[in-house]
Every structure is written in C-alpha cells, then in structure tokens.
Amino acid sequence: MTRRPNLSARLKLTLSYAGFLVVAGVLLLAVMWVFVLRWLPNEDARSIQRRFGAVIILGPKRSDLLNGFAPAAATALAFLLVFGLLGGWILAGRMLAPLTRIASAARLASDGSLSHRIRMTGPRDEFRELADAFDTMLERLESHVGEQQRFAANASHELRTPLAVTRTLLDAARNDPTRDRGELVERLRTVNTRAIDLTEALLLLSRADGRSFARESVDLSLVAEEAAETLLPLAEKRRITLDVTGGPAHAVGSAALLLRMVTNLVQNAVVHNLPADGTVTVHTERRRDASVLRVENTGRPLPPELVPTLAEPFQRGTERVRTDDYAGVGLGLAIVRSVVRAHDGTLELAPRPGGGLVVTVRLPAPAETGGKPRQAP
C-alpha cells in the first residue's frame, strides 16, 4: 500500500526540540519585559524635572534599553533556533537508534532471515523491553517455522512410502499375470489403510493447530473411561492390565479432540509396554485451576535423551518395546501435544522409575462446572 510521504520521526523530534527551545526563549524575554523593562521610565530627565521641580539623576530611559536590547534578543533567539535544530537532530538520532536496529531486524525477518537477533544492551528501558520482546518473537517464529518445515518434509516422506509400495505392487502384478490376486489385493488394502490413517492423522493435526473447533464442557474422567473401554480388547490381547482411577476433571474444549488425545495416550501406553503382564493406569483429578490426566505404563527403562523427542512428529521411539504386528504412523504423541496446545494446556513426559513412561496432561479447568458435562461422542 502506497502512503503519502511525510516527515520522518527524527525530523519531527528535531523540530519539536527546536520549537520548544525558541518558545522558552520568547517566554524568558516576555518575563524580562513584564518584570523589568516596564518599570523603567519612558521619559527623559528634563521632563521629570519640570514635573517634580527637583533635580533627579536617572539612567537611560526605556526606549534606549529597548533599542539596545532588541538586536541582542533577536540574535539570542536565532542562536537558540540553530542550537535547537542541531542539538535536536543529534539527540533525536541517539534516541531513535534502538528503533533503527529493531527496524533493520524486522526488515531482515520480512526477507526470510529469522536467525538475526537484536540483543540490545544498556539500561532496561522501553526500547530494551521492545527489543527483547522482538527477539523472543523471532525465536518462537524461527522454532515454529523450522518445526513446520520438518513436519512437511516428514509428512511428504511418509505419504510417499505407501504410494511407492502401491506402485511397486501394481508393477509386479502387471509383470507377473499369474501372481495370486488375493494376496495382491490384501497387501494393497493394508497399504491403503495405512495411507488413510496417516492422512486422517495429518488432518487432525491441522484441525488442532488451527483451533477450528467448538468448545464445550468435557469431563476427562468420562473420556478416559470411554477410551479404556474401546482399547480394552487390545490390552487383553497383549495381556496388559488397564485401570482407570480418579474422579471428575472438567475441561473446556472439543470432546472429539480430547477423546482422540486420551485414546492416543492409552493406545501408546498399551503398545509400548512389556511383552506380557504389563499395566496401564489412567488417572484423572482436579487440582486447583487445572484438570489433570495422567497415563502411566510399565516397560523398559527409557533413556533420558529419548523422552523429549517422543512427541515430535514421526518419531516412533524405536528404542521402546512394541510388538512387530503394530506399526503406527508416528503421530500419536504429536497429535496429543497439538490437542493439548490447542486447549491451552501443558504436556509433560517423564520416564517411570521402574521402566515405562508417565504422561501428564494439565488443562485449564472452568471456573464453574455447573450443568452436566457432555461425554465425548
């Protein structure tokens, strides 16, 4: 958008400084006129002598002082004007120097360079706070852009894999007409199912990140019970004990997204567990202004450096225990983290002392939980 050219901020400040200085000089001269010059007589000594009949010794009259003072006053005002312009220009430049640095950093950021930082030193004034806030924004923006780029690259790679496998199977079937079509159809169906699951997971991530959902009151304890009931056959198949404990824990958000979050956590806890005789505990409770959901499972001890990466997209945690008949799309905990962020909550991953993982989700609790909360569909 084109804008009409206008005076720069530095020039405006310079004119303001000079103008205030000249006005102060004029006011000083006015004070001198009111309190000094006006008390001087405007008559010569002869006229006063004729009026009072006495000899009076007087100094110069008012007109004489005005004639001698006016040029000096004009010269002083001209000096104040020049001094105000030069001094104001220098002072304005020094005052606006931090803004110039911030503008340069913003210009670099608009060109795509997000690694530049202002790192302003000096006293913590308004400009320093603005520069620090701008640096913090750049750090978050750079981290978000980098995460999105990695996610896009990983998503492209993951989506390309089933498509490449499908093309390979079709090429093999075309080159070998005698191949069993039933086996080909079954393998194509497996690959297609995986591609659909991955696409749905990506769409769910996009929906959570965009926060494009209606909010309502949801009881996490009911959501946990529904998720556990859904995954109970999987837990029994793997001989995993699944328990739901705790009390009501209300949150405000999307019932469908919160159900998917809890389902992913419980499924992740069941799959990444001991080969047999493991346990999964889902606990819900209300703590002051937060509703807490904790999912804890048994398993092998996790390396501390592995835990922070588990919520990254497409990080399947290859060092964790799972059976070969299950292969997720690597978005389980990534979806959980996105859902938690969309609900203004926090996600904490911690290794269990005896082996396994403890996942704690804290969501803001509504001030009042009146009315019956809706259960996730």
Image (cartoon, grey):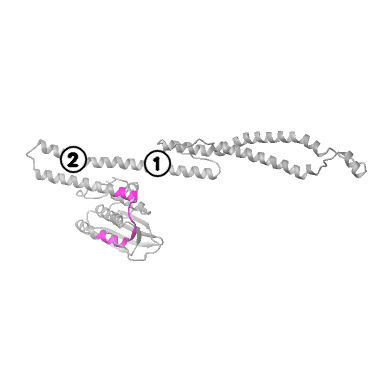
Identity of the residue drawn at 36% across and 41% down:
146
State whether residue 278 is above or below residue 14.
below
Q: Is residue 336 left or right of residue 121?
A: left
Measured as percent of width and height from the top left, residue 94 is found at 57, 37
Q: Quadrant of residue 241?
A: bottom left
Identity of the residue drawn at 37% across and 57% down:
363
Q: Quadrant of residue 15?
A: top right
Residues shaded magenta: 204-228
State whether residue 342 is above or below residue 219.
above
Observer-nearest of 293 and 76:
76
Observer-nearest of 262 and 353:
262
Observer-nearest of 198 and 233:
198
**Amino acid identity at mark 1:** Glu
Measured as percent of width and height from the top left, residue 187 is found at 15, 45
Q: Quadrant of residue 149?
A: top left
Any part of residue 169 in sight: yes
Q: Quadrant of the C terminus?
A: bottom left
Q: Residues within 10 Å of mark 2 (few under 14, many from 20)?
A: some
> Does residue 207 show up magenta in the picture?
yes
Measured as percent of width and height from the top left, residue 173 is found at 11, 39
Q: Kindly give the residue lying farthest to the bottom in the view shown.
A: 371
Find numbered disc 1 in the image and state the secondary structure of the residue it sits on. Answer: helix
Whole-Å distance between the Cαs marked 1 and 2? Answer: 35 Å
Q: Quadrant of the N terminus?
A: top left
Identity of the residue drawn at 88% across and 39% down:
45
Q: Is residue 83 left or right of residue 246?
A: right
- Where residue 142 is drawn, which disc sits there? 1
Q: Which residue is mark 2?
A: 165
Measured as percent of width and height from the top left, residue 27 is found at 70, 42
